[in-house]
Image: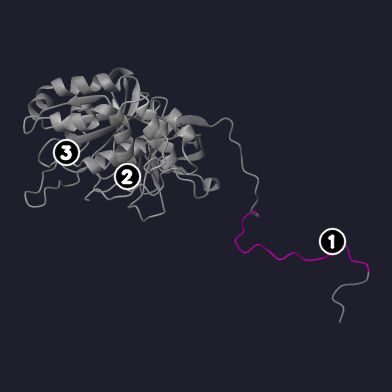
Amino acid sequence: MRRYGKHTDEDDIRARPNRKGNRPRTNIRPKHEDAAEGMVLTVDRGRLTCLVEDRVVLAMKARELGRKAAVVGDRVALVGDLSGKRDTLARIVRIEPRDSVLRRTADDDDPYERVVVANADQLAIVTALADPEPRPRLIDRCLVAAFDGGLEPLLVMTKSDLAPPDELLELYGALDIPYVVTSREELENGDAADRVREQLDGRITAFVGHSGVGKTTLVNALVPADRRRTTGHVNAVTGRGRHTTTSALALPLSDDEGWVIDTPGVRSFGLHHVDPSRVIHAFPDLEPGTEGCPRACSHDEPDCALDQWVADGHADPQRLYSLRRLLAARERREGD
């Protein structure tokens, strides 16, 4: 039986109603040219605290961003209520391109990388000289992540009243990494904070370190007006510290001198995401020597051209040793 007559047009055909009562989905996304610029300060269960001009605004990610996530340090565009008043909520509609990223995976077998911090200029690697003992393999891995992500490394050694820094300084001397040595007494009287602050001037610096090294104590000394967390203790049996920082947080230094980003303490730093070929970019004295390397050279094999480059006097042999140690760090776990 014919449902419609012979001469039907589009108006005669009934359309199935939309049961949800909303508009049909579209691939056209609003541009939001008038959105305000902001910086993500911290992320907590889907809510992002952002700095918009001189106001702290709570926001959530707009649906059109899909799976793209904003992290601490991201420059974002926001719309909605930007007053910063209580019980107001803005929307993040755009995440601007990143200048740098600090990324890590849970372990070397995990293919899923996680962006920890965006747009930082510097990575301050905090390590205790004792209680707990230094972990050079973890330091090496943090250095690889810094070089890979476009951050300049800074080595901060704490608790020098318990052990001298000579051994670590000798290990990393060939890398020409700036460093600061501090003691617990200097942290208490402010001398250590002043010396560290000189390295942070005008920069966005992310602080990383495993638990118990005094990272949060140092951050509290740098930003006394906004003490981050209470400090923890080191377990006498395991030699490991207790986590006192549970989420990354950006804190401004006084007089707009820069930013400190405190990150949770790490016990592992997976490098599954790192392409070893990018680590060589942090060694400008060695990089020209790779032109004679075979294709896909690991820079640690018999026919690597870097051996001859160093033998010809173009670079210090210790620099090549340091490069190979960092490349090997990606292939072994911190505890090995």
In what element is the residue under mark 2?
helix
Magenta run includes residue 20: yes
Q: Is label 3 or label 2 in front?
A: 2
Q: Relative to the observer, which residue lies in front, 144 or 242? A: 144
At x 21% / y 33%, what residue is drawn?
A: 171
At x 30% / y 17%, what residue is drawn?
A: 255
Q: Relative to the observer, which residue lies in front, 113 or 85? A: 113
Q: Quadrant of the N terminus?
A: bottom right
The part of the chain drawn in magenta is: 7-23
Q: Relative to the observer, which residue lies in front, 195 or 19? A: 195
Question: Is the Cβ of the residue at disc 2 closer than 8 Å to that at disc 1?
Answer: no
Q: Residues within 10 Å of mark 1 (few under 14, many from 20)?
A: few
In what element is the residue under mark 1?
helix
Q: Which residue is labeled 1 in the image?
A: 10
Q: Tell me, yes or no, if residue 56 can be seen here.
A: no
Question: Which mark sits nearer the N-terminus, 3 or 2?
Answer: 3
Question: Which mark sits nearer the N-terminus, 2 or 1?
Answer: 1
Q: Classify residue 133 by image quadrant.
A: top left
**Residue 215 placement (x, y as % from top left):** 20, 35
Q: Tell me, yes or no, if residue 104 can be seen here.
A: yes
Q: Which residue is labeled 2 in the image?
A: 328
Q: Residues within 10 Å of mark 2 (few under 14, many from 20)?
A: some
| Left/right of residue 77 with respect to residue 210 in the rendered view | right
Residue kind at label 2, given as amino acid type: Ala
Residue kind at label 1, given as amino acid type: Glu
Q: Residue furthest bottom?
A: 1
Q: CA distance from mark 3 to mark 2?
A: 25 Å
Q: Which residue is labeled 3 in the image?
A: 213
